[in-house]
Image (cartoon, rainbow, N blue to C red):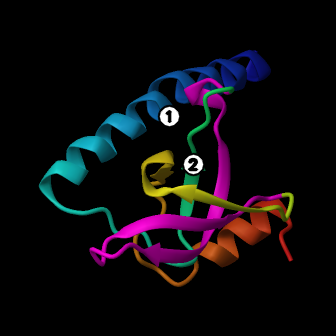
Amino acid sequence: MRLKFSDDFWKRWQKEYLLQLRSFHEVLKQHKSRKLRKGGVVLIQEDVRPRHMRRKAIVEGLQEGRDHKVRTISLRTPEGRRLSRPDQLVVPLEIDQGGDDVEEWYRDCHDLT
């Protein structure tokens, strides 16, 4: 019974929360610019994966364009792989509330070193 409840909860969380997260940030972006920062946790938008199965990554660097707006983001995945993605293809997670402990939390959860 507990296992079924747990499975149902995670399926619902993936379908509802993760699907709405992108829309939330699109609306937020219209009102003010997103606050991506080094050490923040994001989801990587990819055409080959459904929204509820997006990979997580940590922001390692922000590169500005000539207009001084962030255009490219350097990322590190839980596997330790380094990626570079355009600003439009990353979705900040709400867990990043500007605290210094986000990267430490993420490292503990995913054994990053």
Report if residue 35 lies within the magenta region: no
Instruction: Name the residue at 53% across, 22% down.
Output: 15
Q: Are marks 1 and 2 in contact (CB under 8 Å)?
A: yes
Tell me: residue 40, above or below residue 68. above
Q: Who is closer to the viewer here, 4 or 39? A: 39
Tell me: residue 59, above or below residue 91. below
Quarter of the rendering containing residue 49: top right
Report if residue 61 lies within the magenta region: yes
Disc 2, SS:
strand
Q: Which residue is mark 2?
A: 43
Indicate the quadrant containing the N terminus: top left, top right, bottom left or bottom right. top right
Instruction: Name the residue at 32% across, 47% down.
Output: 25
Give the alpha-carbon distance from disc 1 to disc 2, as whole Å.
Answer: 9 Å
Quarter of the rendering containing residue 3: top right
Q: Amino acid at mark 1?
A: Leu
In primary-sequence order, the first of circles 1 and 2 is 1
Q: Which numbered tag is attached to residue 18? A: 1
Name the spot of residue 20 as percent of width and height, x first.
Answer: 39, 31
Disc 1, SS:
helix
Q: Which range is magenta?
A: 49-78
Tell me: residue 54, above or below residue 25. above
Name the spot of residue 4 as percent of width and height, x first.
Answer: 74, 15
Label 2 packing within 10 angstroms: few (<14), some (14-19), many (20+) = many
Indicate the quadrant containing the C terminus: top left, top right, bottom left or bottom right. bottom right
